[in-house]
Image: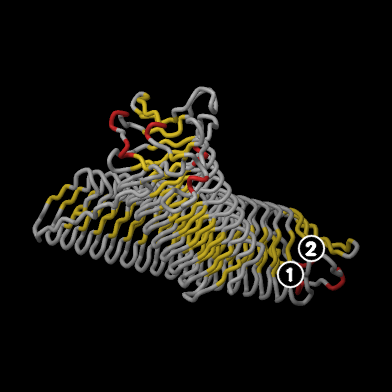
Amino acid sequence: MPRGTPGNDVITGTPADELFFAGDGDDLIRGRGGNDTIWAGDGDDTVYAGDGDDKVSASDGDDEVYGGGGNDKLDGGMGNDELHGGDGDDYMIGGWGDDVLLGGNGNDELRGGAGDDILRGGAGDDLLRSGPGDDRLYGGAGDDLFQFNDAGHNTATGGAGRDRFEIYPTFADGKPDDRGVTITDFTSGEDVIDLSWIGVVGEAAFVLWGRPTPANDPNWRDYVDRPLTMDDLSIRQDGEDTIIEFVRPEGAWRSRPNNFVRLEGVQASDIDASDFLFATDPNAEPVEEQQPAEIPATDDVLQGGTGNDELDGGGGNDTLYGRRGHDTLRGGDGADKLYGNAGNDKLYGGAGDDMLVGGPGDDILEGGAGDDTLEGGDGNDRLYGGAGNDTLSGGMGHDLLLGNAGDDVLRGHSGNDYLEGGDGADKLYGGHGNDKLDGGRGDDLLRGHGGDDILWGKGGHDTLEGGDGSDKLYGGYGNDRLDGGAGDDVLAGSAGADTLEGGDGADKLDGGAGNDKLYGGAGNDTLGGGMGDDTLLGNAGDDVLRGHSGDDTLQGGAGADKLLGGHGNDRLVGGAGNDVLTGHGGSDTFVFSGRFGTDRVTDFTDGEDLLDLRGQGLSGFEDVQARQDGADVRLELSGGTIVLANADLAELDASDFLF
């Protein structure tokens, strides 16, 4: 059972069905497959559940959860969370906080919970339910159901398909006018407003009752006198919009009617009884399925129009335009050009060197075989390069880019993006936002640019550059080069002969196995060499250098540094500033050159360790000015002072020095 610690953990599962307990801290969890149950714990966690029917509970903190394939259940808990359902029929609840829920493919159920939430159903017939707060709901492609029953002013965009907007009683109970719902794209004759949960008691005084409709409750008339009808509604024009409100006697509930539905860009004269569902008619009509256009194997130009179109280019070098609507475009064989335009589109390049442009909306682009170019455009897009040397650009929004096989170039641009190169020598550029870059196999180049990024080199000899922000860089196998850039960064080399450069900020560097080179840069840095014969340079700042095992070279640079050699025969150079030097095990050499301040050697061992004074201009032991100072020995040199802790002056002789 994978289990974390109270700190910041990286936990990776297996393809089996597993139970994860990550514990507190800012954790990174990867399920890898199987039907997993993941308890992320408190902290700002990132969870990739992977394939399978997974259950994820994120608890407190601002979390990112990716369900992946399968029918997942995702619970954001406390905090401002971002939940991605992925493929499958997912159930998602934001919990407390201002959350973003992205359903993805499948028939998903999204519940915002408390806070000002954003819900995007994506493809499929989704259910979106508001909660307390001012929520924004986007249905996407498919016949979606919207439910509104809590405080706040909510905005709904149905998207493609025949959508139903179900108004619950609390939106018409006479509370202030800032409670209600605005529908941005209501289409008369296609979409419907469901008022079947609202009834009337008395002489047109509305007591709105959250009870089942007469269709499934024989005792319905025990709750209200009658269902709502068109006679109880006022439908009027308000500029370019239509306002729907109750009609009732003055003073029956309060002094003026409650505006509870606004239809943007809709003429009041176009609204009639066919646009509503009352208690006597609770079910909407089914939507007719649209058939794709079959295209012969020639060089074609196809244009979709304003609906939800399916275009298939077949063989040949084709050009397909989706235009408006949530379209599906298939290029087929040949070097095709596919333009989704507005809407949540699906573009499949097929065989050949294709160009796919998603346009505005949450799009899915799959290049297929060949050297393809994919551009997501505005929206939260998913781009899959497929086989070949592909170029993927996410554009604006929180995008997912997967290069797969081949030497690919991936650019996230703005938004919090996830980029995975796959096999091949790939180049990944995160852009603005807090991005996650995974190089995969091959000798890859990863650049985070702006934001707090996470970079994984994985297999191969990789180059990782964090850029601005507080980044985390993990080299993986191979001889990697890691450059944190500006910000407080974490760099881990793992196996191989790695080079780590912290850059500006208070950085943490861990070389891992292999003969590594670590450069702290500006700031108060912490460097750990790990296994192997490592070279550690603190540079500016008050640094902590630990060589660990192997014959290491540690150089503090400017600042008050702490150097710990560890096991092995190490070489310790404090540099400028008042430093503390500890050799630990092995025959260690303490080097003092130029002006170095007052340095303290904590564990000098006579007959085993050496003091290298070749940079002090001394001709021999007779030039050394040393004295006993309590339990310590003090050596006064032209470049500074050396304090040998718990040492005996009588035991020092020429064999302890290098001149």
Q: Are marks 1 and 2 in contact (CB under 8 Å)?
A: yes
Say which residue label 1 marks.
Answer: 657
Toward the right, the furthest residue is: 630
464 sits left or right of 281 in the view: right
Residue 107, position as x, y percentages in the image: 38, 58
Color theme of the render: secondary structure
Question: Of label 1 and label 2, which has the lower sequence position?
Answer: 2
Residue 478, compared with residue 46, is above or below; it is below
Circle 2 SS class: loop
Residue 307, position as x, y percentages in the image: 23, 46
Q: Considering the image in quadrants, where does the C terminus appear?
A: bottom right
Depth order, front residue of 93/16: 93
Residue 502, position as x, y percentages in the image: 56, 56
At label 2, which amino acid type do we have?
Val
Residue 468 in view here: no
450 sits left or right of 529 in the view: left
Residue 68 in view here: yes
Residue 206, position as x, y percentages in the image: 50, 34
Say which residue label 2 marks.
Answer: 624
- Residue at the (24%, 65%) spot, across then down: 369
At label 1, which amino acid type do we have?
Phe
- Residue at the (10%, 61%) spot, across then down: 297
Depth order, front residue of 636/126: 126
Q: Considering the image in quadrants, where does the N terminus appear?
A: bottom right
Rounded to the nearest angstrom, the CA distance separating label 1 from label 2 is 10 Å
Q: Residues within 10 Å of mark 1 (few under 14, many from 20)?
A: some
Circle 1 SS class: strand
Depth order, front residue of 47/386: 47
